[in-house]
Amino acid sequence: MSKSRELALASALLTTLAAPAFAETLGLGRAALPEEIAAWDVAILPDGTGLPEGSGDVETGDEVFAENCASCHGDFAEGLDSWPVLAGGAGSLTDPRPVKTVGSYWPYLSTVFDYVHRSMPFGQAQTLTADDTYAITAFLLYSNGMVEDDFVLSNENFTEIVMPNADGFYPDDRAATEYPLFSAEPCMENCRSAAPEVTKRAVDINVTPEDPDGKPAGTLPVITVASTGEPAAVAEPAAQETETVEAAPEAAPEPAETAEAVPAAADPALVKAGEAIFKKCAACHKVGEGAKNGVGPALNGMVDAAMGQIDGFKYSKALAEMGAGGGVWDAASLHAFLENPKGFVKGTKMAFAGLKKPDERDAVIAYLSTFGP
């Protein structure tokens, strides 16, 4: 039997078997029980529909996140390798390279809870309890600067949280506004009302390279024909007379100006090492020209500056009080803070566990010292 005939018979058999299903009830199976439907219907809606009972606080979320999520998303949700960053990016959606995170982009908190509860941790989906998921969600809110460190999230206050980008989305109306523009019958003849004309040449807009004499590059030499009818020699460009001039010694090039010059005391190798280590901090803290506050304050000019004084940033109560009391970010304070942020400033918003190696702290401090106010 040919293969095509086998396929035809198989198709006919399937059609015969399926026909009764469209014509009458086969009497197979039973109606799903409500609890069975509920087990599959696990979606959490923006209005709170589907939320399980439970609660979780920021501190517990920090611990659960560190155990289950940090291996991919970093200790403070900054993202590792190709895994996504979950914190930061505030105000970056209009930038050429926006940072889309839970705080900057996601419109509904229910999406965070739903995704974590259903799909995370990677490879161990649905192993987190409802309380664990509430705690992780609370920690992500804290990491994005939306709640304080004593915040407790539950099914009762869940819908009170309004995400920063909740109004940043709109319905896809392209079917009504754009599709008609591309659905008309195309013009196939006599489509121009006027004859085409050349309005500009490539040489006019400086996309044609030029020879040193100012003529467009690749210009061919002119060939003339003598009156005898024999072709004349190709006219070669006249040789330019040259004059040997003793070259003056070149002046030493001026050093390039930089926005933030490295202080003489900063070891360039140490600064370079600090720049690499600072990548752990870059999700929340910005430095350099145009740096703005994000999840954490911008750090330009912070070395040897007063604590808690960056304009426009809402510090934790503890750090603000330290600054008001005359606290300064000198080398000793920076070392203590970078080693154990929560130990140095009780109640700090900074969730980073700290840099335990002294040489890493030295490098970061050296790097930060290169950025003036």
Image (cartoon, rainbow, N blue to C red):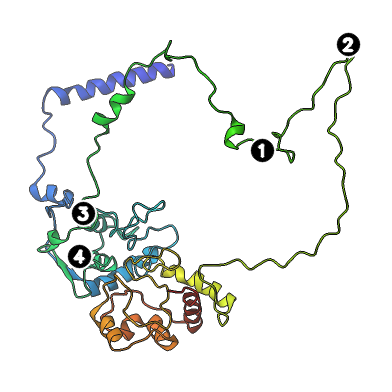
Mark 2 to mark 1 CA distance (whole Å): 36 Å
* Pick the front one: 250 or 52: 250
Relative horizontal placement of residue 369, taking residue 325 as reference (left or right): right
Q: Where's residue 341, x and y in %? A: 34, 81
Position in image of residue 343 (x %, y %): 32, 85
> Is 255 situated above or below 47?
below
Callout 3 environment at 10 Å: few (<14), some (14 to 19), or many (20+)?
Answer: many
- x 37%, y 86%: residue: 328
Any mark on residue 108, and which? 3
Q: Which amino acid does the dot numbered 1 rest on?
A: Pro
User: Where is residue 258, by image quadrant?
Assistant: bottom right
Q: Please tell me whether mark 2 or mark 1 is closer to you in this view.
A: 2
Q: What SS does tag 2 mark? A: loop
Q: Earlier in the sequence, mark 3 or mark 1?
A: 3
Q: Amino acid at mark 4?
A: Tyr
Q: Alpha-carbon distance for marks 4 and 3?
A: 14 Å
Q: Which residue is mark 1?
A: 209
Q: CA distance from mark 2 to mark 4?
A: 96 Å
Residue 54: % across, % down:
13, 65
- Identify the residue under disc 4: 134
**Local crowd at mark 2 within 10 Å, few (<14), some, or many (≥20)?**
few
Q: Residue at x 73, y 30 (%)?
A: 219
Label 1: how many Cα within 10 Å (few below 14, some 14–19, many 20+): few
Position of 327 with respect to 132 (left or right) is right
Q: Earlier in the sequence, mark 2 or mark 4?
A: 4
Nearer to me, 229 or 281: 229
Disc 2 residue type (three-letter): Gly
Q: Are marks 1 and 4 in contact (CB under 8 Å)?
A: no
